[in-house]
Amino acid sequence: MIRPILKYGDQILHEPATAVGAITPDVDQLIGDMIETMYAAPGIGLAAPQVGMGLRIAVVDVSIGRDPSGLIVMVNPEFVERDGMQLEEEGCLSVPGFNATVVRPSRVVITALDRSGTAFVREGTDLLARAFQHEIDHLDGKLFVDQLRGIKRDLIVRKIRKLTRAGKW
Ligand code: NI
């Protein structure tokens, strides 16, 4: 089932999510819905708070479904290593219509549980490193807009407020 994606300003997006205790049938269903919602958007990643669930779950597929092995389900992900630096344009399904250049590590290693509850370690470089960092930020209540500084951030936030007031957000 495709779930509605919440937008910047919805409180759950701005709060840290809670660790998953066990992969219950409800959690499995949520993961399935998140995968469907991500591909339908389409997007390269989606975190549970974006569909209104404050749980530490994210899905990523930088191939957007083109590569059958591209799908990564992360439950309770944590960074093991982070290094390097990249500067690329970034957007978010919860901040539609806005992009900005965000500084990110160029390589990360994460550990997480997969959909069956088995622990795994995964290295990501370039776009995958960016996606891991972006999604784990969501689980900490942070959006890419929060990584921006000064007028770049203010400009986006002001435009979103204006759209919200006009009932167009
Ligand atoms: Ni996002």
Image (cartoon, grey):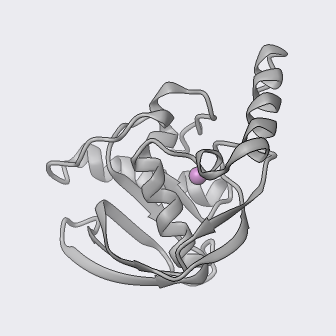
Question: Residue lying farthest front?
Answer: 150
Marker count (numbered): 0
Q: In this view, does 59 lie above or below 53?
A: below
Measuring 78% from the left and 54% from the top, which residue is drawn there?
99
Q: Is residue 56 above or below residue 128?
A: above
Q: Which corner quadrant of the image does residue 164 belong to?
A: top right
Question: Residue lying farthest left?
Answer: 21
Assign the C terminus to one quadrant of the image: top right
Q: Which corner quadrant of the image does residue 23 belong to?
A: bottom left
Measuring 38% from the left and 66% from the top, which residue is drawn there?
73
Asked if residue 105 lies left or right of residue 74, the reply is right
Image location of residue 101, percent across then percent down: 74, 62
Image location of residue 74, percent across then percent down: 35, 64
* Residue 69 in view here: no
Asked if residue 144 lies left or right of residue 99, the reply is left
Image location of residue 5, percent across then percent down: 59, 39
Image location of residue 126, percent across then percent down: 59, 82
Q: Nearer the viewer, residue 67 or 101?
A: 101
Q: Which of 73 and 121 is in front in this view?
A: 121
Measuring 54% from the left and 68% from the top, which residue is drawn there?
131
* Residue 25 in view here: yes
Q: Which of 6 and 41 is in front in this view?
A: 6
Q: In this view, does 65 lie above or below 162?
A: below
